[in-house]
Image (spheres, grey):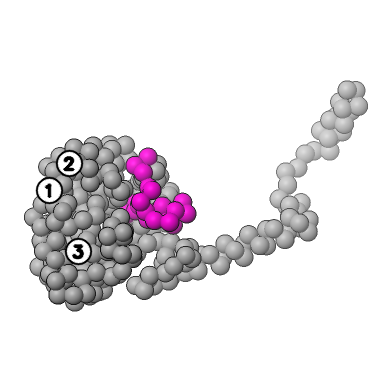
Amino acid sequence: MAERNRITIPTLYEKKAKGEKIVMLTAYDHPFAMYEDRAGVDIILVGDSLGMTVLGMESTLPVTMDIMIAHAKAVRKGAPNAHVIGDMPYMTFQISKEEAIRNAGMFMSECGVDSVKLEGGRNMAATVRAIVDATIPVMGHIGLTPQSISQLGGFRAQGRTVDSALALIEDAKLLEEAGAFAILVEAVPPPVAKIITERSSVPIISLGSGPDCDGSCLIVHDMVGFFERFVPKFVKKYADVASVLSKAFEEYVEDVRSGKYPAPEHCYSIKQEEMNKLMEALKRG
């Protein structure tokens, strides 16, 4: 893909105004970020989902700021043009506004991300306002919020009743009023997500919430078949990387054990005269 300008928040607002879909993916390391950036992905989220997709954790809850910072630095280096978002991990923004600002600031100053994301609706509106007032852009996140799975009763779609749908619509309004520059809406029925989008002046991104939002997001390991524990209903699988890797590893194991690898073409050469000198030197002790 041809070189492009860096994606900024005004760029995202312009896309919403023109009706151009915003493309968002997660990335957790330099190689994935590099290829996503080259493909033209607008927003790359360094998600705390890396706890499950990369580190083998049972949930996102054990992920720490130290972990997130290391991965965010790698993603930023690999994606110079995309809008990179650092995902605020569990208990890095819930304790106090001061703690939230401090951790968000670490993402910005140490990693060079463009903004941060945090989960929660009306309960986090005041925290969003405090972070924004500290000059740090914030993406909101409502619907299925993985850090709250104990309260939600697991990974379940949200907004499927009148009361819960109305609550999500109000949450989006309050986050926008608090200064969020965009909102990620996860696992919400498309008609509800459409209402949220139509009533919002900031970009609304769908993560399993249908086609009527201003853009779509997927977990990269889900869409390339690189996470096998479970696959959400809303995921479209664009590749089967797990099968490719499994085949490559199996062939490598077989080649090494059978003596096919390394073959002569994989080895460095040494001139015969140098080898003769080496053998003489060894004989002399």
Q: Which residue is mark 2?
A: 97
Spatial CA span between label 1 and label 2: 8 Å
Kind of element beneath mark 2: helix
Give the image location of residue 239, x and y in percent. Answer: 47, 69
Furthest residue toward top? 285
Q: Which residue is mark 1?
A: 126
Residue occupying image coordinates x 20% and y 59%: 183
Residue occupying image coordinates x 18% and y 75%: 161
Tag 1 near tag 2, CB within 8 Å: yes
Q: Amino acid at mark 2?
A: Lys
Tell me the tag on residue 204.
Answer: 3
Give the image location of residue 14, x and y in percent. Answer: 16, 60
Kind of element beneath mark 1: helix
- Nearer to us of marks 3 and 1 is 1
Spatial CA span between label 2 and label 3: 24 Å
Quadrant of the rendering where the C terminus is positioned: top right
Start and end of the magenta stretch?
45-66
Magenta portion: prevailing SS class: loop
Decide whether residue 95 is among the magenta residues: no
> Measured along the vertical axis of the image, is residue 263 above or below residue 235?
above
Of labels 1 and 2, earlier in sequence is 2
